Amino acid sequence: MTIDTPPTLEDGQAPPATVSRTGSRSKMRQFRRNFGAMFGLTVIVVVCLMALFAPWVAPYDPTAQVLLNRNRPPFWMDGGTFDHVLGTDQLGRDLFSRIVYGARISLFVGIATVLIQTSIGVTVGLIAGYRRGWVDTLFMRIADVWLAIPFLVLAIAVAVILGPGVMNTVLVLGLVGWVTYARVVRAEVLTVRERDYVLAARSIGTPALRIVRQHIVPNVMASVLVVGTLQISRMIIAEASLSFLGLGVQPPNPAWGSMISEGRDRLGQQWWLATMPGLALMLTTLGINLLGDSMRDILDPKLGPKEGGA
């Protein structure tokens, strides 16, 4: 989305601040009336609170092993109890507690990864779009080579080199996922740099860094926000994939991907071991995707308002 300069005042025209406030209120109304946005926001708030207050939400230590309680089913099944509402795993660890603490790891990896990707991708996109010429060509050819390699294959290759672990997972995903931001920001900058107010600033000798900071960056941030929101869910799935393959978060740390991996061979007998963390992963990424998609619809005027649903 691009933002034009404030309009000049004419007879009967509202001041820019009033127009801005009116536009903001309209977007907030659209957001509140959008079922997908509200559902996604609710899911994200619940998961974030669960992760933030995990020591108080989780009834047990997620790594504590009680072999006498192993393979307990969820409370609604025969043999299940409310002491372990979602059952226990093969080592007697409470599944609900592990899912709660797993939310911490997934959200941390998703948010930290997106911050790294944003820093790299936005910087590359701004430089390529504003400078153009050989700089743009060089950066975009590097991006093309990056995109030619499947994302997960590249992440696995880098993870094998750096080794498993939470911080290495963040670094791996951050290094391989910056291209999306670079391409989106470059496309926005190529449009914004030709606007009259940018051309006027350049004609009076305004330094390039100041033009980028004051006129270009504010116009591309809406697109970066939408892409970043959608990328968080993608990075959470990527982290779960690496953990599932044993290249991400390592046991006994409770990561959703590794929990699914541990329970995949017991789906016939203890189906809840893989199903419950799988449902947590699905709901979290679904909520983030719905919120990001609704934000795109609301913030991009070319798409028009969609107040009735996702």
Image (cartoon, rainbow, N blue to C red):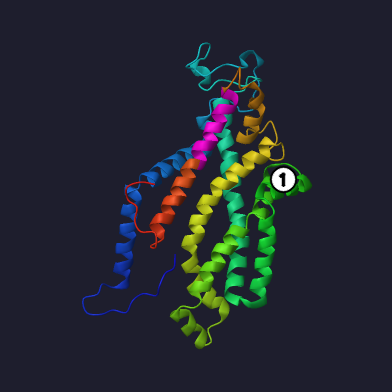
Considering every residue shown, the one lying at the far top of the view is 79
Residue projecting furthest to the right: 161
**Total marks placed:** 1
Q: Which structural element holds mark 1?
A: helix
How crowded pointer 1 is (Cα within 10 Å; few <14, some 14-19, many 20+) is rated as: many
In the image, residue 98 lies at what x, y percent? 59, 29
Please identify the residue farthest to the front as the structure is shown: 148
Does the segment drawn in magenta span residue 284?
Answer: yes
Task: Please name the residue that numbered disc 1 is placed on.
Answer: 156
Residue 48 visible to an observer of this rendering:
no
Residue 305 pos. (x, y %)? 34, 56
Decide which of 5, 187 is in the foreground and name it: 187
Q: In this view, does 142 lie above or below 51?
A: below
Q: In this view, does 64 lie above or below 224?
A: above
Q: Which residue lies furthest to the left in this view?
A: 12
- For the N terminus, give its image quadrant: bottom left
Which residues fall within the magenta stretch?
Answer: 272-285
Q: Which residue is drawn at 45% across and 42% down?
A: 45
Image coords of residue 176 (percent x, y): 67, 54
The answer to whether one can see residue 218 in this image is: yes
Residue 235: horizontal and vertical position, in percent? 59, 47
Predominant SS along the magenta part? helix
Name the one closer to the observer, 160 or 67.
Answer: 160
Q: Is residue 188 magenta?
A: no
Give amino acid for label 1: Ile
